Image (cartoon, coloured by chain):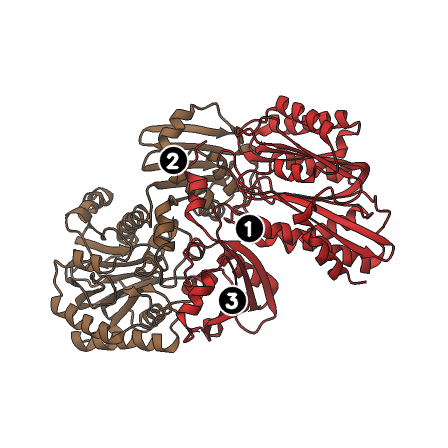
Chain colours: A brown, B red
Amino acid sequence: MDNMLVSQKHALDGQHGGSVTSPLGFSAAGVTCGLKASGTPDLALVYSSRPCTAAGVFTLNRIMAAPCVVSRETLATNPDQIQAVVINAGNANACTGEPGLCAARRTQEITAVELGCHPNAVLVLSTGIIGVQLDVEKMIAGVRQAVGQLAMDNGEAAARAIMTTDTRPKRMATSIDLPHGRVTIGGMAKGSGMIHPNMATMLAVLSTDARAPAPLLQRQLRAAVGCSFNRISVDGDTSTNDSVLLLANGASGVELRGPEEAAAFGSALTEICLALAHEIVRDGEGASRFVQLTVTGTEDAADALAVARTIATSPLVKTAFAGGDPNWGRILAAAGRAGVPFDPYQVGLTVGAGTQSVSLVLGGAPCAFDPARAQAIFAEPEFQISLSLGSGSGQATVWTCDLTHDYVTINADYHT
Amino acid sequence: MDNMLVSQKHALDGQHGGSVTSPLGFSAAGVTCGLKASGTPDLALVYSSRPCTAAGVFTLNRIMAAPCVVSRETLATNPDQIQAVVINAGNANACTGEPGLCAARRTQEITAVELGCHPNAVLVLSTGIIGVQLDVEKMIAGVRQAVGQLAMDNGEAAARAIMTTDTRPKRMATSIDLPHGRVTIGGMAKGSGMIHPNMATMLAVLSTDARAPAPLLQRQLRAAVGCSFNRISVDGDTSTNDSVLLLANGASGVELRGPEEAAAFGSALTEICLALAHEIVRDGEGASRFVQLTVTGTEDAADALAVARTIATSPLVKTAFAGGDPNWGRILAAAGRAGVPFDPYQVGLTVGAGTQSVSLVLGGAPCAFDPARAQAIFAEPEFQISLSLGSGSGQATVWTCDLTHDYVTINADYHT
């Protein structure tokens, strides 16, 4: 059994139809209900006829959108009988007070009536403008339309309906062969978004036909999100609506037994999350470069992550990336303000793209590198940066993009 | 005695010649030594024939530039006999290892020889590109030239010589009448800067003809900086070179006696620092709007400051400002991710400009405000935002600018 090999192969499925409906027993729909002024699809439904165990990870923002509040409550009370996820784009239903909570619950109820299940079997997610009440009539019409269009080959349509400023749908699937059979994990995600300019909301829905208890799913989802969706940054702004859901319907008849099978599943789940997370960064608002940043040599992983995040969100670093400029001083300066102790005279910095790499800094001072080679690496659409801060064993990797004119245009030049 | 009134009147001096040489006994020079490729002035010297007590506040960045390391050491060993500050633009002398420290010390020595004082009477500051060794020969030539041009009416020239991407020199002076006579405080500062694109380095040098012991100056400078320079943000990137120095030469013959006179002096010092800090924000890289942001109702001032800083550095908030867009959802969402506890249903938000103000949010939900009035306020070049988060007594005010296309141009489209 070579899970990684198998899952690697199937991870390519995203380009060949892999989606949230790839696992057995899932169907989906993507429809237009009129929440987006553009008239493009804005409501997605994911459905499993078999009840699912489910898990969810939600934004840590103090101002949590109504659908996140409602879905978190629903998952807490009914984690073993989830059947549907309704996602609308065009309105975040955040900062909408009590009416917003009512609108989210009403969406649950209507969907339950249409699907013939309990309201507590329905999860809801939203993305779009903040502070505007959700038009429930449009939601009702959209849900009815979506229920009528549920199909196994509508995974792409669902991924498209949750897009906001995304330029392309993000979907993926992978399979792993376990001793008692094959299980499949599918998923879709959206990145930075607005219909009017708004929060960069990250949503993802993952599905699997494996059978697993909800607490195991929750642990695995939390771990997978921790090293994927939580390691990316487009602009450092944590949304009021960020959510990742995982539904397991057991339709494959294969149950995750014992720690080894759980680990194989967790590894494949992480792979899907990472692939979707990378797609979000690559398609970040205005992004023209995808940068992998690894920090090593700190006392622990938390310190490495703190440094990596500070660099990955620095406007000066990200504008230098936009210019294709090997301005390494900004990277070190950002590291220095992360609040993590290190010896400036032990700092090393290496950059690479493809098979090329160049050491820019050793022992805290610039190396005698060839500027043209450094320039060539920073001019690539994808490159890697490795920053070593000493001899500790802490390390962390994050992914970020550049801060471009288009980012400013997307977020400043449109008006509410 | 009405110190505030007197100091208010004299604060306008910035437009009429007020500068670092306004206090008695200070002279200055601004010359061109060739560190800037543009050929504009790049070396400033501030001098007092009488030895000064002095204080300094330096960057908290782990990677501290060589001149900051040297000046901090000098202040620690010789705080009562400072006579000169040499500031160069065009090269930050940061990430330059041991050679960088030697270059900073060599600058001290040369200046001391030229002025006939001890090297420990000379402080050094730098701003410009990181990671390039400072050309000491150019510094020597520049210092010699500057010593020859020292004059009481060269405060403007000195303020101009420390500019990088600043579009105008920043200088200011104020006077206060104490029971035993008048004392004057002058100052100059520079903001976000590069010659090649680089760190937004903030430097300020303050002078006074009051007589005060160094420990008192240090306490007063720290307090003044804490509520002025430390409350502004252009892009959230703390430089390797940020420094504020204060020199007191006692030339007025007026000594600060007792807590009341110290408080009057401290108040005027804060006023100067605040005026210079505001000038830095107004002249921030690419900035087109100046925004005052006050957060109230948190448990303590530290919490209020954490929320205010998170909002003031949010790319989504700052791009909305650039668009003149009353996108208040982004302000609340940024507040929510600051890591500070508050009840989302107690949030209030008011914006104002001039005599106009509009309440946008009450009890966490949007008010029925006139969108045109909100739009008009956000379209102003200067406006205020007040965010209340509950009933606590904590509050803090910060000043920030917008994130514009020009910021990206300045920092991305030029190359090292």
Q: Nearer the viewer, residue A67 or B253?
A: B253
Q: Is residue B332 visible?
A: no
A188 relative to B190 in the view: left or right: left
Please report, as a chain letter, where disc 2 is located.
A
- The amino acid type, in three-letter code, at marker 3 is Gly
Secondary structure at numbered mark 2: loop
Which mark's residue is nearer the viewer, 2 or 1?
Answer: 1
State the CA–CA distance, disc 1 to disc 3: 19 Å
B311 relative to A120 in the view: left or right: right
Query: Mark 2: few, some, or many residues within 10 Å (few <14, many ≥20)?
Result: many
Q: Nearer the viewer, residue A202 or A23?
A: A202
Which mark's residue is nearer the viewer, 3 or 2?
Answer: 3
Extreme top residue here? Answer: B137
Query: Mark 1: few, some, or many residues within 10 Å (few <14, many ≥20)?
Result: many
Say which residue label 3 marks: B352
A89 relative to B405 in the view: left or right: left
Q: Nearer the viewer, residue A220 or A198?
A: A198
Secondary structure at numbered mark 3: strand
Say which residue label 1 marks: B281
- The amino acid type, in three-letter code, at marker 1 is Val
Compared to residue B306, the image places residue A101 above or below, namely below
B274 relative to B333 in the view: left or right: right
State the CA–CA distance, disc 2 to disc 1: 27 Å
Please report, as a chain letter, where disc 3 is located.
B
Say which residue label 2 marks: A324
State the CA–CA distance, disc 3 to disc 2: 40 Å
Tell me whether the residue at label 3 lies in contact with that at label 2, contact meaning CB atoms closer than 8 angstroms.
no
The image quadrant of residue B157 is top right
